[in-house]
Amino acid sequence: MATTAELFEEPFVADEYIERLVWRTPGGGSRGGPEAFDPKRLLEEFVNHIQELQIMDERIQRKVEKLEQQCQKEAKEFAKKVQELQKSNQIKEAADVIQKLHLIAQELPFDRFSEVKSKIASKYHDLECQLIQEFTSAQRRGEVSRMREVAAVLLHFKGYSHCIDVYIKQCQEGAYLRNDIFEDAAILCQRVNKQVGDIFSNPEAVLAKLIQNVFEIKLQSFVKDQLEECRKSDAEQYLKSLYELYTRTTGLSSKLMEFNLGTDKQTFLSKLIKSIFISYLENYIEVEIGYLKSRSAMILQRYYDSKNHQKRSIGTGGIQDLKERIRQRTNLPLGPSIDTHGETFLSQEVVVNLLQETKQAFERCHRLSDPSDLPRNAFRIFTILVEFLCIEHIDYALETGLAGIPSSDSRNANLYFLDVVQQANTIFHLFDKQFNDHLMPLISSSPKLSECLQKKKEIIEQMEMKLDTGIDRTLNCMIGQMKHILAAEQKKTDFKPEDENNVLIQYTNACVKVCVYVRKQVEKIKNSMDGKNVDTVLMELGVRFHRLIYEHLQQYSYSCMGGMLAICDVAEYRKCAKDFKIPMVLHLFDTLHALCNLLVVAPDNLKQVCSGEQLANLDKNILHSFVQLRADYRSARLARHFS
């Protein structure tokens, strides 16, 4: 076939084609040579060649038919495109004409040209509908260029806004396929923002209208469905849902701020948010306050129920205030003393739960309150925290603890009030932290700041007054316990033994037991308090401890060996005083130790000892009172030396 194809060179002449074929065939030439003319071979070549030509003809025919079909198809498509372009151009032309006619018709008097005006209006309406339908179809086909052309024509028609409505409606078809409407809305707006500028001459207005449609129809309906169901039946779920929905809506608004929506997009978006939530935000704080009160009361009641405890009524008013003042000044246990069995009625779990509920309320208040109402709303939440945490829980525990402190002359009393102090201090720190972290930012720039600080100051002062009263009475009880130990263990013969020669120099049993008791109390005070409070309380206990030992020693008469025992006891008391780590307390016991030397010093050396560094500044009556405790004081010699 390759040879055959070469024979079809242009220009084609049949005789020459056959001649060339004969000459190419062996034995087909008429000239002499090694191969003579062979008619059979030539006939065979012709037959084969004719068959090849027939095959070639069939192939070429099929190719021609295929090309003809393709040409016809392209011709039809081209004709259709031309027709569409012509039609499109006639729309533009018709739109231009009808638009001008419509404007002119507005000026014509109705009574004379009513029929004409009616026809023009009808044609105007029909053409407008056709354009909108064409825009709709183009949008469904995804033909942005056609949409732009039709939108440009419709721009001067009244139905242009309807064109935008159609675009917005179709944009949202299939846009909400996830379970997250806020994420879907953000993706939709991002997609439209990229496209809208290629279609409309006022893309920011179209995008703004889409966003308005999303907020006022889709989001508003979603929010209503979520909130109305639990609005009256479940305050906790309602508040949580309201907070989450409002937060997510404002989050979506922040994303949309990136787009060009016109001049004041902040105000535009704020109004949209307000239109959705206004009915819920108007009474938000009342729902919040009501829920927080009931929730706080439930947390407290659940705790007291777990303790099988029925709360006592703590009286208020003139009589109760008078009792409190008398109790603070006299330490009298006005009212019946109760046995709490060591229970402090303070629970860190309760406190954490109350603070957590209040923290969430502050967060919701910050998000959901109008800026002008925020400080006032935050203050209302704070007052509920004060009521249930400070008054109903802490103050109640302090009152109960005070009532549980035994009288100072009780034996083996359980001085658990220090446990109350310890837990109350921990709670105060948590309360103060929430005040600073969560309330202060909401009120810092408002007049409510001073009101909150004053309320906090009053509450803390009231609590501290009761803590001070309880600590003071507890210290009295500690001293009372020491008195009982000394009364039970100290013998008169300890300091005036019958056999002076068989006394082993050591401290007495009473001293040992008192020191053991004191060291336990010092450790308990250190564990129950912090900061300067530890030093303050230890200072007070140390002073009272010193006064107790001072007065105790003055009850006895001392022989020489008895005086030595007293010195040994005071030395042990002084070691105990070192644990206080309070210089003044140690100084008191150093002085007491020096005073005890007056019990054993030789009469001739009394004046010298009294004028020594540690005793020189003491009142002479104090020195004399110790000298009088000596068994040999009445001897004229001692009296003469001391005088």
Image (cartoon, rainbow, N blue to C red):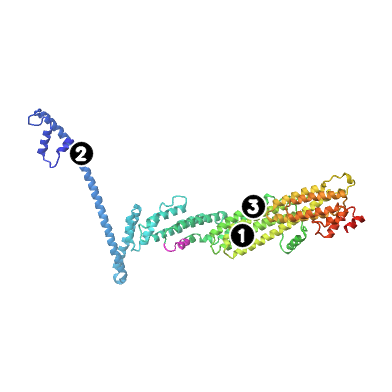
Per the image, label 2 sits on a secondary structure element best described as helix
- Pointer 3: residues within 10 angstroms few (<14), some, or many (20+)? some
| Kind of residue sitting beneath label 1 | Phe
In terms of sequence position, does the residue under pointer 3 or pointer 1 come before the other? 3
- Which residue is under mark 1? 382
Q: Which of 579 and 28 lies nearest the eye of the viewer? A: 579
Q: CA distance from mark 3 to mark 1?
A: 17 Å
Q: Is residue 114 left or right of residue 530?
A: left
In terms of sequence position, does the residue under pointer 3 or pointer 2 come before the other? 2
Q: Residue at x 44, y 59 (%)?
A: 212
Which contiguous range is marked in magenta? Answer: 262-271
* Residue 264 is covered by the magenta coloring: yes
In terms of sequence position, does the residue under pointer 2 or pointer 1 come before the other? 2
Q: Main secondary structure of the magenta part?
A: helix
Where residue 622 sits in the image (x, y, percent)?
Answer: 83, 58
- Pointer 2: residues within 10 angstroms few (<14), some, or many (20+)? few
Instruction: Single out the mark in the foreground, 2 or 1.
Output: 1
| Kind of residue sitting beneath label 3 | Val
Q: CA distance from mark 3 to mark 2?
A: 96 Å
- Pointer 1: residues within 10 angstroms few (<14), some, or many (20+)? many
Q: Which of 475 and 290 lies nearest the eye of the viewer? A: 475
Where residue 13 sits in the image (x, y, percent)?
Answer: 11, 40
**Disc ID at residue 350:** 3
**Disc ID at residue 59:** 2
Where residue 469 sits in the image (x, y, percent)?
Answer: 73, 58
Quadrant in the picture for the C terminus: bottom right
Q: CA distance from mark 2 to mark 1?
A: 96 Å
Q: Is residue 542 left or right of residue 391?
A: right
